[in-house]
Amino acid sequence: MQILQEPVSRDDLKIIARNTFGDVVKFVADVRQGILAMDANLHADLETALLKNGSAQQDLWGFNLWVEEEGEDFIEYDSLINIRSWQGNPSRDVLDPEVRKAIADMVHRFIVE
């Protein structure tokens, strides 16, 4: 488990994926601070790490990166931590297009070829 300070290559993601789930790496984004945590068995573990790092829970969103996929199939906006009706998101999916865009922008900034 790590909070990203530097970009990570897709090749590194593939290695991480092979050591855990095979083809996917779990992430949590802090959309206010623009930081990502990655590489845990549960999104909740990444959420806890970011909370201990000073993030606010309402800013944290879980997602997955499918390391062999491209385009829209690369990012999956699905996590149990995303279920929060009090914030207008009663689904495992991230429903807010602005939050999805913020996550996609961070992925493009932190994940390099």
Image (cartoon, rainbow, N blue to C red):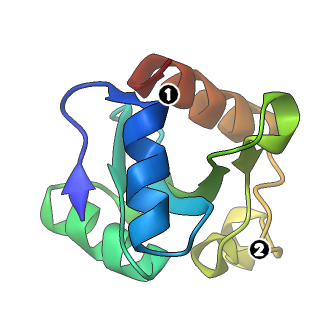
Assign a secondary structure to mark 2.
loop
Asked which quadrant contains residue 56, the reply is: bottom left
Query: Residue 71: percent from the left, percent from the top?
Result: 82, 28
Query: Residue 82: percent from the left, percent from the top?
Result: 65, 70
State whether residue 48 is above or below residue 50: below
Q: Residues within 10 Å of mark 2 (few under 14, many from 20)?
A: some
Amino acid on which the number 1 mark rests in the picture? Met
Q: Which residue is mark 1?
A: 106
Amino acid on which the number 2 mark rests in the picture? Arg
State whether residue 104 is above or below residue 78: above
Q: Is residue 9 visible?
A: yes
- Position of the N terminus, as image quadrant, is bottom left
Residue at the far left in the pictured view: 53
Residue at 34% across, 69% down: 46
Residue at 70% across, 44% down: 68
Which labelled disc corresponds to residue 92?
Answer: 2
* Left or right: residue 14 compared with residue 15: right
